[in-house]
Amino acid sequence: MESENSLLEIIKGRYIKPVYQPIASLRDGSILGYEALSRISLPGCEINIEELFDLATSTQRLWELERLCRTQALRNAVAKPVGTRLFLNVDPNILYDPEFISGFTSQMLREFGMNPDEVIFEITEKSSVSAVPVFISSIEHYQKQNFQIAIDDFGSGYSGLVRVCAFLPNYLKIDMGIVRKIDQDSRKKSVMTGIVKFCREAGIQVIAEGIETQEELVTLIQVGVDYGQGFFLARPSENFQRLPGEIKLLIKEARNNSLNMGGSVPVFGHVGAICSKKRALPANAPALPVYRDMCSDPSMTEVCVLNDDGTVCGLLTRQYLLGRFSGQFGYSLYYRRTVKDLVREDFLSVDSATAIDDVAAQAMERGPKNVYDAVVVTEGKQYLGIVTVRDLLNEAINIRVKNAADANPLTGLPGNNAIQRAIEEMIADDRDCAIIYLDLDNFKAYNDAYGFSCGDNMLRLLAQAMNLCCSAGDFKGHIGGDDFIILTRDTERLHELCSHIIETFSEQIQSLYSKEDWERGYIISKNRNGFAENFPIATLSIAAVTNRTVDFSQTELLSKTVAHAKKQCKQQAGHSVVIV
């Protein structure tokens, strides 16, 4: 009874205070948006916000409380930075509250001068499996109003990938139970990697919740998670915070290190090779001359602004600067300002060693207001130049066409020319690296017994297993026939990677055999002399060589070492892995 009285007092007295926690890009540390969280401001209240919502549900006052929290969050969100989103939590059960008002949020947005595309509803079915129909209805309700949707607490409740695929939300927020200590748990890392691959193919952005350590953050960046949220990045606050400079720097460095691991650069090239060194200005330079130059020279589309130490302070684009000086009072407001006063801080900056294809992807993921802005290129944190989106896309297309022409038509993996280029660039690099050769055992016998079509399916299946198990930075190639290759810089997890590929391949090949052959464990096919012989189910021989013990620049020694490792594999029955 006392708790119920507290609920009534909170609702009537509007004792709810919103706080906002940043959701940041794990590419560059820029802010995607802020999750609005509610705090009880009633003095002496002994129940927390979760208990308050449970009580509101049981006393049929859920919509009253939800409306109060939503109103407070929207009212204060007017002060959020331009271009960022507001994430609002939604209890799906409010749809069944008799007091629920459809269209309430749209009305409030108009009142506060906000647009619907600035709001993303976070919906969860965490509470109970019986809430699944309510969960579905809630998603449909907001999607019909053209709001963006995030499925919250994925991995803790009952929402599965099938349901996610059916509704195609804009964002998938991964529960902290999966994120917590992911750097120490290979199973959690594998789960997260699978989720990222699924969402990438489905066009869904992944947000990891509950990041509390640097190690968790770096691991999430390595597996390709799009956005992050947690105490390590920033705690909830009444103000709309940016990430601390050291956290943004950590994210960028971890991102670049992840991109430079094992093969993405040989396949797609460095962005530093195509950037142009254009005019840059010190932060204290006056803005008026730049405005006049841009008015007289239409080809001047942007200018970089630099700090005293040569690092990039921001980007001043033509459209943005002319917009500031336009209007009735624009000129008088800004003609005395410096470029630092007007500079945009939401620019995209990449290291010169970043792969061109990845930079193009990052550029096109930006919001509509700055999707076509030039990209700043740095080297050793110092300004190197800029590259336009047009140049990026043209170069990425040219590279993809070139690689597609060289790709194996059966598996789609890069062929021998691309493999040779990748190996040469790996040899020229002093960092740890490994070459992994994969060979199918008893493939010829299977091909003869089941036919070329089934043999092709087995090769495709192996290529698929490689793609599923390798990280985004690993280079995967098809030498020809049943011979494949992987180049990687992650030498610490070689055995884990090889074992994962074998396990994945073994789980999938049963469908390629008849029930009779699979159950007895062998097939009957002709040997090289034309006589019938029993051949075991196809297995994998994997030989890996690292540059820790073998100098890759000594081609003859490398070839001999690889040949010896492959021979050792072939001498073992069943699946085998030999690492030198």
Image: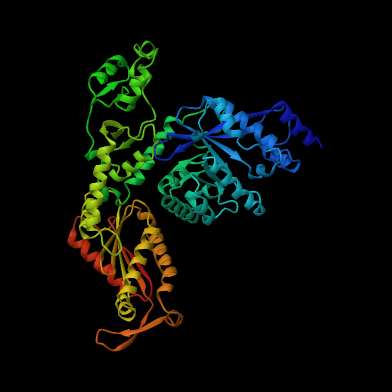
Q: Nearer the viewer, residue 322 or 573?
A: 322
**In which quadrant will I find the N terminus?**
top right
| Residue 214 seen in the figure | no
Q: Horizontal and vertical percent for residue 393? A: 27, 42
Q: Residue at x 71, y 28 (%)?
A: 42
- Is 468 placed above or below 59 here? below
Q: Residue at x 62, y 28 (%)?
A: 72
Q: Residue furthest bottom?
A: 531
From the viewer's perspective, tell me whether residue 353 is left or right of residue 369: left
Q: Horizontal and vertical percent for residue 315? A: 33, 27
| Residue 328 seen in the figure | yes
Q: Nearer the viewer, residue 88 or 243?
A: 88
- Is 396 placed above or below 481 here? above
Q: Horizontal and vertical percent for residue 217? A: 46, 43
Q: Residue at x 62, y 38 (%)?
A: 102
Location of residue 163 (image quadrant): bottom right
- Is 326 placed above or below 413 here? above
